[in-house]
Amino acid sequence: MTIPATAQRSLVSRLSARMDWRSNIIYVAFIAVFILFAITLGNDGFLSGNNLLNIVRQTATISVMAVAMTFVIANAEIDLSVGSIAGLSSVVTALTITHVGLVPGILAGLLSGAVVGAINGGLVAILKVPSFLVTLGMLGLAAGLAQWITGSAPQPITNDLYVEVFGGGDLGPVPGLLIWTAVAVATGWVVMNRTRYGRRVLATGGNPTAAAYTGIRTAKIKFLVLLTSGVVAALAGMLYAGRLESGRFQWGQGDELTVIAAVILGGTSLFGGRGAIIGTLFGSLFMGLINNGLILAGLDVAQQQVVRGAIIIAAVALSRKR
Amino acid sequence: MVETAAPPAVRMRDIVKNFGPVEVLKKVDIDIRAGEVHALAGENGAGKSTLMKVLQGVYPITSGTIEVRGEPIVIRDTSDAERAGIGMVFQEFSLIPSMTVAQNIALNRERLGRFGLVDDKAAEVEARRIFEDLGVELDPRATVGTLGTAYWQLVEIAKALAKDATVLVMDEPTASLAKHEVENLFRIIEKLKDRGIAIVYISHRMDEIRRIADRITVLRDGSVVLSDTIESSSSAQIIEAIIGRRLATELVYRDRGADRGAPVLLEALGIASDHVLRDVHLSVRAGEIVGLAGLMGSGRTEFARVVSGMDRPTKGQLRIDGRKVVFSSTQKAQRAGVALIPEDRREQGLVLEHSVSDNLVLPVLDSIMSGPFISRAKTSRVTGDLVSRFGIKASDPFAPVSLLSGGNQQKVVVAKWINTQPRVLVMDEPTAGVDIGTKTEILEMVREFASQGNGVLFISSELPELLAVSDRIVVLRGGTTYRELERSDIESEEQLQLIIQGEPA
């Protein structure tokens, strides 16, 4: 242990104990950007209740996936396949509802995510393949499968109850998607912070050797985390299907990057051991805020992508220690 | 010491452990009694760690029996060992930095409160109780990552105690502790002894063993070569048991007749820096080994960093051959002939996944080129030459350096830098965690290097080795040069220790 390193670390830790800016930067950024947009885009309808609810609606699927991704990243793994799983589950649900029925459709959608998640988790936990590679492969595989079984055609959903529950409907003045988001975040927070499972996820991500010596079955934890991520991504795909009244292989395409950016921006360590669920929610809302603002500001899709990419890079840079 | 008829806390008999065809433990017998500190000594690779890992359930034994308090048990995995009351304080700490002290102590056996949710308050109460019993002040809610290493160790001890450990294995517990922290640890060990806890104390440091242990077992090549009380074994006997037939005289100073009039190679005049250093003066002559002594935080490592170009001084001057130099990078320092062997070989000295050969040739790539390409023939020649010259025990020089023992890894680091033909070699704790046999070999390499007319700045907290190689010793204190001593003026280790502690000697 070198003295300057200790001195520096204690200085850094003293500073971060006082402001902990790395994990709280998202709140500052969120408020700053919100005020910025309120001033510059107030006349373009940014502040209207409808627009703000729209931001929540459009980010709901991202928020839900990001909650599960927080566990994955806190566990020092990554899941690049969530967007493709969402697309796959949307078409599986739509096809099954049309050809079999509502309940089988819902189950089939969740099952598709469970199968992909179990394959991801099994390869990582048992065969020790890095999750980056496994889920990168699965990103293409699941998307291709969704496109293949539908012949690239959209699959309409005509079941009103499904649409009502999975994202299309409102509960009084409250959009259903807001409720889904709230449930996902609340569940995620309790599991992460107040259950043994959450502790084991954080321990495995924070120091896998120590976790193993403590008697934690780290392979099992990795498996469960990736399995859950698959199931939750499938749920997100079903919310897409409900909101847009159809299953399509494109739903969720590219979401993995937005989801990961939201989690990292929220203060979860890319190196594992820390998982900030509330931060993740704000990270996700922040991404939605940026999208919304950039559209209102009249930027085209290409320009939006450039700005979004820059934000992802900034998020990773800020999450780095020292 | 407890002399009773009660069965020992742990009795291991005829323990054999094979890794493939390699026999690492050859019928080892050891008894660890309740309420004693049992020192376990031996060179790296003698089987100490393997024996303890077997007890810990990390590896299954090949054959033999283990009894805990008279009951024969089978230890298949770490949870079996835990149930038997065997706890381990790891050398490479096994805590989760992002969690709090209390969360770490309770990890994987968290108490559940309402709705089956984890009860952190109960964990904090438990942690506080354990620390109170030990007489330690530590906030259970502090995040482990923000604490110093000494506290990590306390948390590890508390974690083992929370699992009702009756046997505690400590692997090199003082390796990264400052002096007062060592005192604190010894105080805690005494308390644990009083409670009847058996402690296995793995250490290379003879003074600590003499001070804290009741009995000692020495392993060599997988067999017990000494097992006795501390009182009835002399240090010489213990060292001989550890190193075998080899002579233990290398840790004695030999005057190599360094020329006091030789030109000064490296000179530091009033060096100050952002961290710690305030006013350091010293010089190293050609052919001379200068020892740099001081307490933790006295500025030894910081000075090494400045001399080797890692940090810039804010004040003062560095001179090489009497000419002022400014090192803006380590490359500049190396070109001027200054090489640093850093403190932490695994983090700073080696690319662990790369082969022995790749590590050796890394700083001298230019010399093994054939046109624009690296020449395999030249690489092999350089590697073979260094491996034999420095006695590196590597069955395959093209296998990852991480497979070598700690001592051999350190030889690779030393060989790698001496091969760059520096004129001044700065060594920061070059024998940390290295067994005594390898240590004497490394010290001999240093002597030989200096005798060729080069200068060495040798930083160490181990006074015997500092006294064994240094022609002169500079003592730092609070970032300033406190004393400068000719080797011949130092009569004993105690005298040097007093000076380092800042007491009038």
Image: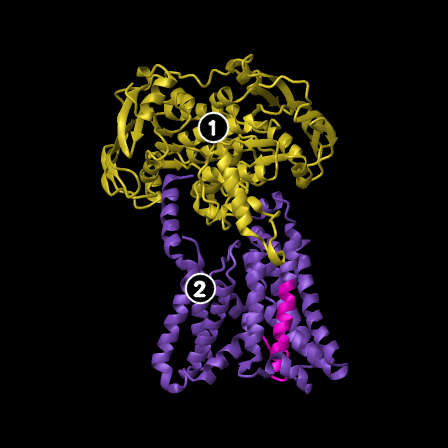
Chain colours: A purple, B yellow
Res. B403 visible in picture: no
Residues B196 and B307: in front is B196
The C terminus of chain B sits in image quarter: top left
Does residue B191 lie above or below A56 as drawn?
Answer: above
* Snapshot quadrant of residue A249: bottom right
- For label 1, the residue is B187
**Quadrant assignment, res A253:** bottom right
Residue A266 appearing in the image = yes
Q: SS of the residue at dot 1?
A: helix
Q: Which residues are magenta?
A: A228-252
Kind of element beneath mark 2: helix
Identify which amino acid the numbered label 1 is placed on.
Arg
Q: List x then y, in percent, for residue A191.
A: 59, 60
Main SS of the magenta part reads helix
Q: Position of B232 compared to B458: left or right?
A: right
How much space separates mark 2 and mark 1, taking CA atoms? 47 Å
* Residue type (three-letter) at the residue carrying disc 2: Ala
Where is residue B333 drawn, in percent x and y? 33, 40
Q: Are marks 2 and 1 on the same chain?
A: no
Name the residue rendered at 51%, 15% in the picture. B235
Reading the image, the residue beneath label 2 is A315
Height in image: A211 above or below A159?
A: above
Chain ID of residue with mark 2: A
- Side (left or right) of B285 relative to A60: left
Residue A243 sits inside the magenta stretch: yes
* Residue A110 disc label: none
Say if A110 sits above or below B374 in the image. below
Q: Chain of mark 1?
A: B
